[in-house]
């Protein structure tokens, strides 16, 4: 069942149960049914009914092999909480189709309350890649839950987009933050990796460089995963997307980001630039 339909089947009691499981996901890998019974308002019959309903929608997981019943929220469960939160803050009226699937996310089109098309990116760290899980897990004590990491990534991307946007950078305008999801402007364009025909490739490259400069000087961040796949072009204007891993990373990261772009423009658009000059422009 599509995410949007599942969200609409969740009524207030199931929703509060989902939120209870989310709140407890930091301290409990699996939440004992006994705890749920003790700390929620439901009588045993109601609880049974709502758990079964959430289970059927695959918004929670039921563990039976511990000697007692225990539950945890699934990624889809967190997605549904995000959808409801964005709906209640009148940011997202309805969710539409999936438009992109990254290593660490699912990206959907949707509509705001004025029927403008927008984008909702659901962060799902650790869904496919153990490597990405390790990369974001900077906690020296390790062992943050995937739920926590996904939430932190959404927050980091929202914060980065907000700073970039306020400083006039070419990024999708951030519209709202769910739990593990961000709503943002839809860029109706193509990925630079598709090698679109550019009216003025020099100007496009300059625009990308000034976005990197805004990130570095105003927001104190480095994208960290910059490549032609994370640049969307429309009417010769390049928008840089996919900011969750951005950080005050090493100068090496800045160099690597830049060299991906410079070599792409050299190969595909025959533009030759020297990285050291660009670096001193960005830092200056
Ligand atoms: P990756 O695997 O590269 O880390 P990701 O999971 O972090 O990807 P994004 O790169 O942010 O996800 O988005 C995945 C895809 O969704 C993009 O390549 C793009 O096609 C589409 N997309 C994301 N944001 C937007 C947007 N604001 N407007 C239009 N399309 C978008
Ligand atoms: Mn990537
Ligand atoms: Mn990407
Ligand atoms: Mn990414």
Image (spheres, rainbow, N blue to C red):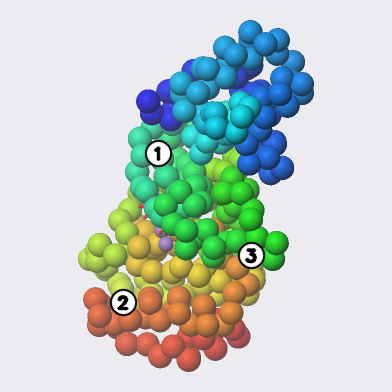
Q: Quadrant of the N terminus?
A: top left
Mark seen at residue 150: none
Q: Quadrant of the C terminus?
A: bottom right
Whether residue 83 is visible, yes or no, is no
Q: Earlier in the sequence, mark 2 or mark 1?
A: 1
Q: Which residue is mark 2?
A: 264
Q: Residue at x 76, y 23 (%)?
A: 39
244 vs 261: above or below: above
Q: Which residue is mark 3?
A: 138
User: Where residue 261 sits in the image (x, y, percent)?
Assistant: 38, 76
Q: Residue at x 39, y 32 (%)?
A: 96
Dot 3 lies on which element? loop
Of residue 250 and residue 160, the one placed in the foreground of this image is 250
Marks 2 and 1, how far apart at CA: 29 Å
Dot 2 lies on which element? helix
Quadrant assignment for ligand 3: bottom left
Q: Earlier in the sequence, mark 1 or mark 3?
A: 1
223 vs 233: above or below: below
Assess disc 1: are there few (<14), some (14-19) or many (≥20) residues with their C-alpha within 10 Å of its C-alpha. Answer: many
Q: Which residue is mark 1?
A: 109
Of residue 237 and residue 255, the one placed in the foreground of this image is 255
User: Where residue 105 sits in the image (x, y, percent)?
Assistant: 45, 49
């Amino acid at each position: 069942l599509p995410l949007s339909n599942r969200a609409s089947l969740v009524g207030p009691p199931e929703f509060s149960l989902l939120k209870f499981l989310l709140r407890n996901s930091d301290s409990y890998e699996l939440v004992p049914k006994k705890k749920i019974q003790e700390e929620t308002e439901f009588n045993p019959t109601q609880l049974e009914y709502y758990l079964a309903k959430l289970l059927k929608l695959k918004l929670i997981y039921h563990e039976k092999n511990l000697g007692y019943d225990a539950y945890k929220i699934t990624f889809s469960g967190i997605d549904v909480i995000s959808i409801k939160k964005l709906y209640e803050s009148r940011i997202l009226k309805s969710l539409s189709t999936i438009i992109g699937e990254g290593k660490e996310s699912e990206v959907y089109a949707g509509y705001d309350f004025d029927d403008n098309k927008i984008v909702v990116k659901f962060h799902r760290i650790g869904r496919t890649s153990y490597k990405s899980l390790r990369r974001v897990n900077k906690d020296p004590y390790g062992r943050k839950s995937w739920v926590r990491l996904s939430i932190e990534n959404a927050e980091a991307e929202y914060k980065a987009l907000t700073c970039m946007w306020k400083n006039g950078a070419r990024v999708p305008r951030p519209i709202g933050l769910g739990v593990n999801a961000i709503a943002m402007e839809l860029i109706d364009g193509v990925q630079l990796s598709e090698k679109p025909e550019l009216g003025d490739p020099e100007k496009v490259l300059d625009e990308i460089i000034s976005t990197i400069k805004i990130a570095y000087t105003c927001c104190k961040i480095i994208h960290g995963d910059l490549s032609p796949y994370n640049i969307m072009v429309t009417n010769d204007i390049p928008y840089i997307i996919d900011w969750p891993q951005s950080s005050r990373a090493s100068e090496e990261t800045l160099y690597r980001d830049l060299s991906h772009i410079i070599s792409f423009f050299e190969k595909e658009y025959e533009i030759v630039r020297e990285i050291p000059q660009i670096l001193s422009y960005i830092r200056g």
